[in-house]
Image (spheres, rainbow, N blue to C red):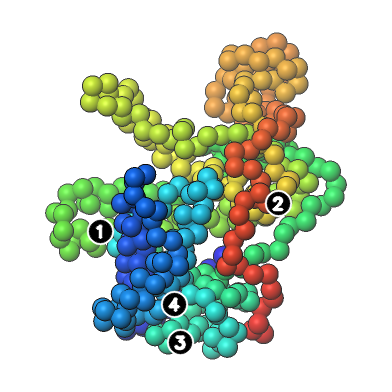
């Protein structure tokens, strides 16, 4: 996806929100139909039957008829694609979409005539039943046949053109790198480099904690609480944007520098489960575990692995993670006493000293590949909306 910031007028924002409501309404109806299915009932309606029902609903209800048929139809196509992913075992079952959380819709049959450049930093895209909506021309838009418009919790509109980026070719120098993902050090390379994802600055962190305390004291449903939630969402969006930008740059750098990239096999979802337990058997160290889970999620281990697979398909291998942080890379001795602290590794046998994460990355680089869960991206169902092409608009 090539994402850009939309800048709609207030009236255009209302029209975009109406498209989002229509798409969410159709999606939730499809989810409800499949939720009522049981083994003793007939099969849930498929895409063709749901399309026929949508045509009848548009004829009977003016609210749906006033909206864009393409938006509503594509919501059904997205749901059908999500169900295919669920039955293929690559995705979870699609769930309800919520107002204020899942705001967005997809448009297809996009043509070069629907895009124009107004100035050096401003462009415009034509959206059905909305008109020409301005967006930030931060770079040359690609030639896409579909796009998605979304609204995040911080109140920002975005448009993402769906294209398949060109594959990053291997440098051909037969260089192998091992990557150890951590919390204090986000990425440690077997070359000795330590890469840390950006976080909120100290002043921003203090303001975020201040807003969190104000939010806990605000009355639910009040306007004051809504304003505080928006301020918190904007700070979190800023942190998320920095992290995503950092991940894109670092994964591109790794795909360009190395022919083979090795990662440890981490089950992030299991690692970040809550430790609360049940009422009969409550957990131990719940607060400390929740803090660790939050830091793991902030490190975006899963996104790093996924973007590496996207940019270097077939060149990413997964190795077993057991004992990589306790094994000496020089002599091979494995003992818990080798790991002196988070950052210090000193072998009790040969005396080899290194940064603990770098030593683990070297063990990963020398490890043996195992089959990754889900297979390589080439084994997965192909996405039907992106298209390889060049930009139709001159700079």
The answer to whether 297 is drawn above or below residue 353 in the figure is below
Give the residue displayed 46% in from the left and 45% down from the top: 298
Give the residue displayed 22% in from the left and 52% down from the top: 215
Q: Position of residue 150 (x, y in %)?
A: 42, 68
Q: Earlier in the sequence, mark 4 or mark 1?
A: 4
Name the residue nearer the viewer: 303 or 80: 80
Q: Of tags 2 and 1, which is closer to the observer?
A: 2
Q: Callout 4: few (<14), some (14-19), or many (20+) C-alpha neighbours within 10 Å?
A: some
Q: Is residue 203 left or right of residue 137?
A: left
Asked whether residue 181 appears in the rendered view, the answer is yes
Q: Secondary structure at mark 4?
A: helix
Q: Secondary structure at mark 3?
A: strand
Name the residue nearer the viewer: 113 or 358: 113
Residue 312 disc label: 2
The answer to whether 58 is drawn above or below residue 198 in the figure is below
Residue holding disc 4: 70
Q: Secondary structure at mark 2?
A: loop
Residue holding disc 3: 132
Give the residue displayed 36% in from the left and 72% down from the top: 54
Name the residue nearer the viewer: 60 or 393: 60
The answer to whether 80 is drawn above or below residue 285 in the figure is below
Q: Position of residue 89 (x, y in %)?
A: 52, 45
């Amino acid at each position: 996806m090539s994402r850009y910031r939309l800048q709609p007028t207030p009236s255009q924002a209302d029209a975009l929100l109406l498209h989002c409501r229509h798409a969410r309404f159709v999606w939730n109806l499809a989810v409800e139909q499949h939720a009522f299915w049981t083994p003793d009932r007939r099969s849930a309606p498929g895409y063709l039957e749901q399309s026929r029902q949508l045509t009848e609903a548009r004829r009977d209800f003016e609210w749906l008829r006033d909206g864009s048929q393409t938006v509503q139809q594509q919501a059904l196509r997205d749901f059908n694609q999500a169900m295919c992913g669920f039955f293929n075992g690559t995705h979870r079952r699609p769930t309800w979409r919520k107002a204020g959380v899942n705001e967005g819709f997809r448009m297809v049959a996009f043509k070069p005539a629907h895009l124009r450049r107004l100035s050096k930093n401003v462009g415009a895209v034509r959206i059905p039943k909305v008109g020409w909506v301005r967006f930030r021309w931060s770079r040359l838009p690609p030639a896409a046949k579909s796009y998605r418009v979304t609204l995040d919790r911080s109140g920002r509109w975005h448009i993402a053109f769906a294209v398949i980026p060109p594959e990053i070719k291997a440098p051909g120098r037969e260089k192998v790198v091992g990557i150890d993902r951590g919390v204090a050090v986000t990425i440690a390379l077997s070359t000795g480099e330590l890469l840390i994802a950006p976080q909120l600055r100290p002043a921003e962190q203090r303001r975020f904690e201040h807003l969190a305390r104000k939010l806990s004291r605000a009355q639910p449903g009040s306007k004051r609480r809504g304003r505080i939630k928006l301020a918190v969402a904007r700070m979190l969006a800023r942190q998320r944007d920095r992290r995503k930008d950092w991940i894109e740059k670092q994964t591109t750098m790794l795909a360009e520098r190395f022919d083979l990239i090795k990662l440890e096999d981490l089950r992030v979802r299991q690692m970040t489960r809550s430790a609360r337990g049940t009422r009969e058997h409550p957990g131990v160290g719940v607060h400390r575990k929740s803090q660790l889970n939050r830091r793991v999620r902030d490190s975006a281990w899963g996104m790093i692995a996924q973007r590496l697979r996207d940019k270097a398909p077939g060149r990413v291998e997964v190795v077993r993670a057991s004992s990589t942080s306790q094994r000496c890379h020089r002599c091979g001795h494995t003992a818990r006493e080798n790991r002196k602290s988070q950052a210090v590794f000193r072998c009790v046998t040969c005396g080899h000293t290194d940064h603990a994460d770098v030593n683990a990355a070297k063990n990963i680089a020398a490890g043996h590949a195992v089959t990754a869960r889900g297979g390589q991206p080439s084994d997965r169902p192909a996405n039907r909306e992106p298209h390889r092409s060049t930009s139709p608009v001159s700079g």
